[in-house]
Every structure is written in C-alpha cells, then in structure tokens.
Image: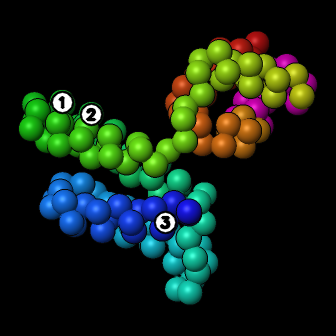
Amino acid sequence: MSLALKIDEQIKEAMKAKESERLGVLRMLKSAVKYAVIEKYGAEGAAKDEDVLAAVRKEIKKRQDSIEAFSKGGREDQVSKEKAEMKILEAYLPAAMSEAELEKLVQEVIAELGATDKKAMGAVMKACQAKAAGRADNRALSALVGRLLP
C-alpha cells in the first residue's frame, strides 16, 4: 500500500475514532502532499512515496522551527501541541540510521568520491543523501561530513 493510500485510510480511522487532533494533522499532511504533487506533476499527477516522504519531512521541519520559536517565547502549551503533531508525522518516516551506520556510509562515500578537503562537501552530501534515502537527518549528516572531511 502506498503512503498516500495509507494516509487516506488513517484519516478514515481517525474520523471513526473521533481523534480530532490526529485527524487535523493527517488532513494537513494530505493537503501538503497534494500541493507538492500538483507543483511537480500538474493537477492530474499521482503521489509517489518519495513525494509523500518529502512532504512529511517538510512538515516535520516546520514543527521543529515552531517548537524552537515557541520555546524562546515561553509558549509551552504550543510547544507540546507541536511536539504531538511532530510525533504523528514521524510515524510516516522510515527508521532512522544509527550513528555507526551513518558514519560508515559517509566514509564509504568519501572514499568513492576521493574527497580530500571541505571543498567536496557538497558532492559528498548529495551522494550521502541519495544513499541514506531519507533515513538520516540532514543536520546530523552535514555535521558528520564536516567532521570527517579533512
């Protein structure tokens, strides 16, 4: 079952269970996916799993930014709401790579590309992101690449 169909099914389940918070997040996610598909393929396009994952990551990033802003503003009620929404969204992401797996991946890519200095960071990052296939946080990946490149 594709992720787009899974979201549709879970929207129905949330409606039946009267889970208004979860329902709101899922509807927002479905809308974000639809906008991304329209932008990429046009009105008649169909959502692919990578499009759904990209939309999920984008929405999680929005939540992270909101949590940071609300924390600075002392809005703990909003922080807890955003964290709950982020937890619902994270269920759609593939399992994250461990630190050891990530380090091994980065070292392999550096060896493949023959990267010798920080000037190659962009190419290394691009290759690592492609190989990680969404299972690694880009901030952590960037920090690791920066640390491992001489």
Q: Residues within 10 Å of mark 1 (few under 14, many from 20)?
A: few
Report the side of 74 relative to 118 (left or right).
Answer: left
Q: Are marks 2 and 1 in contact (CB under 8 Å)?
A: yes
Q: Nearer the viewer, residue 138 or 117?
A: 138
Q: Main secondary structure of the magenta part?
A: helix
**Front residue of 119 and 22:** 22
Label 2, on which residue? Answer: 68
Residue marked by disc 3: 4
> Tag 1's secondary structure?
helix
Q: Nearer the viewer, residue 130 or 113?
A: 130
Q: Residue at x 17, y 36 (%)?
A: 80
Magenta span: 113-125
Q: Earlier in the sequence, mark 3 or mark 2?
A: 3
Mark 2: amino acid: Glu
Q: Is residue 61 visible?
A: no
Q: Quadrant of residue 15?
A: bottom left
| The N terminus: image quadrant | bottom right
Residue at x 14% of width, y 41% of height: 78
Q: Where 21 falls versus 115 (above or below)?
A: below
